[in-house]
Image: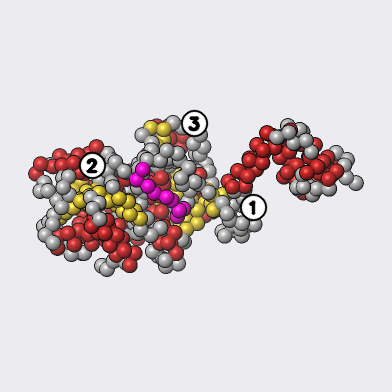
Amino acid sequence: MKLRPYQEELVRKIKLSMVRGHRHIVAVLGCGGGKSVIQAAIAKSATDKGNRVLFLVHRRELCDQIERTFTTMGVNMALCQIGMVQTVTRRIAKIPEPAVILQDEAHHALSRTYRRIYDAFCGAYLLGFTATPQRMNEGGLGDVFDDLIESVSTEWLIQNHYLSPYEYYGVTLADTKGLHTRHGDYVKEELAELMEQHVIYGDTVKNWKRYADGKQTIVYCASIAASKETAAAFRSIGVQAVHLDGATPKRERERAVQAFRDGTIRVICNVDLFGEGFDVPDCEAVVLLRPTKSLTLHIQQSMRSMRFKPGKTAIILDHVGNYLRHGLPDDKREWTLKTKKRKTKNEIRVRTCPNCYAVLRATATKCPQCGAELKQAQTEQDQKVKDMLLQKISRQPYDSYHKCQTWDQLELFRKAKKYKFAWSLHKAVELQIPIPSKYMYMLYRMGMRA
Ligand SMILES: [Zn+2]
């Protein structure tokens, strides 16, 4: 296994940061960027020099997987320990002091169990990896890390064929308004109730038939009951579907995953099973039925279908409006170690095609999926200018509407003066200002035009 050029570049940057005196470094790499080979390369160069490495993971399933990669990459496993966070915390006194701690899924780094380990080995370098370097509640990771290094973006990975391109459809079936938040995400019980009581499973299947028919699909659900019902709805139309959750016996789970790989099972419905890094089989489509406030979770779930395969276009079917909260998987995001005061940093700029529900960038003028022409979206900038004009007009004694030259100006003037809508129509006719065609019928109704 050889590193890709951008992966080598990231390793180089991390080493440079260490040379410059940073001890706790977090590296940001998009999902699918190949974190584990980079981690292996770093572990190898440490063990080659006789240094000890401690690799922290937070799910048991990941240990075997990482050990395989590390062995293949030539890491001296006599000097490298891969451990679950909980286990390591319990045995901390018996573990020889490492020179380097590698931390997978570093967005968890602020939790107490992790910090206990860092504190115990305060002489070690700490190198964290994540696609989303922030806490659930938008907090930065600056309490633990002193340098943040970014690698290539998700957009770049798609353009350079390391990830598959995708189509994202937003057909909202559940309204999350009114749900409460606990520990940074929606309250589980409320979510379960919403998804079990108000979502019609048949609609999920219908939309899947429309957008992702026949594709190997993973469905993310909010509760076990909802997941079972969804799987049943798929089976009722003859699609091979299973439900899996954390309590499914390992053997059964492995059998299902193998059948999914072989294509005898088409759809896997699950609850938080493939959350972080679990070795999920390749899939072509994901269905999002679990509303989340966590950007990390949103990215992990929606990008699960994007592992590269020549000719593949991943389908993301979002029924719960996660794109409205977090945007598209490859949106440009600005990361910082600081805690954000306001949430305005990474603004969501998406729009939905009224014809086919494809989720597109706000700047799109034509839907690439169905070809529909889209009206120019009102950008935030336009709105700001309008708001400013409105304020300006309302503050000054603006007594002459004769200065208005366009319909928009007339409307702003009218709103500032709190006149009725008909006023604008009258004045537009008087000043010979073109009126938007959608209001023409009103003119006729008012008998103002022959
Ligand atoms: Zn469209």
Provide the residue designation for mark 3: 178
Near-viewer residue (135 or 367): 135
Q: CA distance from mark 3 to mark 1?
A: 31 Å
Secondary structure of the residue carrying numbered label 3: loop
Secondary structure of the residue carrying numbered label 1: loop
Magenta stretch: includes residue 335? yes
Q: Position of residue 129 (x, y in %)?
A: 29, 52
Q: Is residue 49 left or right of residue 337?
A: left
Q: Position of residue 309 (x, y in %)?
A: 40, 65
First along the sequence among labels 3 and 1: 3
First along the sequence among labels 2 and 1: 2
Magenta stretch: includes residue 183? no
Q: CA distance from mark 2 to mark 1?
A: 48 Å
Report the residue at 77% width, 33% height from top. Answer: 420
Does label 3 point to a residue whose CB lies under 8 Å from ligand 1?
no
Q: Which image quarter: residue 285?
A: bottom left
Q: Which residues are magenta?
A: 330-338
Q: Position of residue 262 (x, y in %)?
A: 35, 60
Q: Amino acid at mark 2?
A: Tyr
